[in-house]
Image (tube, grey):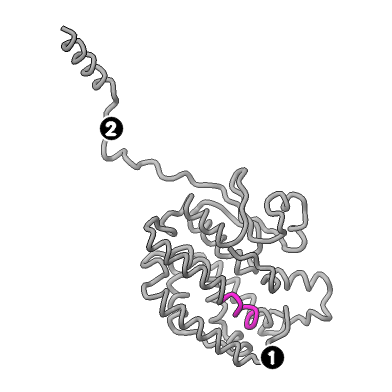
Amino acid sequence: MQDAQEAATEAANVQAVPPPPPPAEQGANPPAKGECLIYGITGSMNCMGSVLLVTAGGCGKLETCMPYQDTAKPEFLAINPFHRVPALKDGDYCLAESNAILRYVATSYVPDAYPTDPRLRGFINWAMDRFSSTMYADCRGTLNPILGYGLPPADQAAVGKKCSQNLEEFAKVFLKGKFVGGQKPSIADYKVAPFFLCYEHPVVRARSCVECPDRIKQFNKDFAAACDTTGMLSSIVKGMFDLVQRGEEDIDCSEATPGQQEAVKSLFPLPGREHMS
């Protein structure tokens, strides 16, 4: 008798459990889209990677924040006490450093840009770390002097040649596929794309002796087609270096006004103050 009652009770409990949703409903709710604010400026290639990612992912936008001016305000220091851009605010969550922001945004809202496969994710991180630890130094000897911030190196040809070699090596190791992450852009691609596009501009070749490899040029085209469909990045880079080429922003910082100095500083970080992650 007791066994019969237990069986009846178990059957009733099973019937009380709601059935799983039909196949069409499973996974119907996509990850919630955030309202990420990226604090920075379009003239900073460090900022533009994060801006492009939140724009492509439909999860945020740029909040213009001028380095050395807005970054000293209490409201910004509450987000990043280290005075640096880019910085992110997503609801009540705050974060800084370009690599950290890219990882957070992709993990939270754009998962295709940061696959969970540990080997692929490791490869993507390797590419980002390679750029941050080694190739970012090339910017200080090639891009910064063109923009009027900092003196050119003593041997510009040697620095330009080394930069060209680093670009070649990066392409051979990390761009065996269309992008670093394979056929789809990853956060590593968003990281390097703004800088790589700068290297293709004729004024960089003429003044910094950088030969942009054909593979990098192809990457620039592929990235623009996939992630910069509005032409935002290409317009910014072209406009910035075209002005320099015409001599309209070729500023000698030793004689520039404080306002001019701050404007030039906002384009690229000071040596030794990158705070790379």
Q: Residue furthest front?
A: 2
- Label 1 CA crowd tier, 10 Å (few <14, some 14–19, many 20+): few
Mark 1 or 2: in front is 1
Picture coordinates of residue 60, whole percent (x, y): 56, 52
To which quarter of the image does residue 137 belong?
A: bottom right
- Tag 2 or tag 1, which sits nearer the N-term? 2
Residue at (65% x, 92% y) in the render: 155
Residue type at the position of mark 1: Ala
To which quarter of the image does residue 147 belong?
A: bottom right
Picture coordinates of residue 77, whole percent (x, y): 73, 52
Q: From what the image shows, is residue 74 above or below residue 14?
A: below
> In the structure shown, which secondary structural element does the residue marked by tag 2 occupy?
loop
Residue at (43% x, 63% y) in the render: 122
On-image quarter of the N terminus: top left
On-image quarter of the C terminus: bottom right
Q: From what the image shows, is residue 198 above or below residue 26?
A: below
Picture coordinates of residue 121, whole percent (x, y): 42, 61
Nearer to us in this view, 231 or 85 = 85
Q: Is residue 235 left or right of residue 122?
A: right
- Label 2 CA crowd tier, 10 Å (few <14, some 14–19, many 20+): few
Residue at (68% x, 54% y) in the render: 80
Nearer to us in this view, 128 or 233 = 128
- Residue wearing tag 1: 154
Q: Is residue 164 left or right of residue 63?
A: left
Distance Cα–Cα, label 1 vs label 2: 69 Å
Residue at (71% x, 84% y) in the render: 247
> In the structure shown, which secondary structural element does the residue marked by tag 1 occupy?
loop
Magenta span dominant secondary structure? helix
Q: Which residues are magenta?
A: 135-143
Q: Is 108 contained in the magenta span?
A: no
Residue type at the position of mark 2: Pro
- Residue wearing tag 2: 20
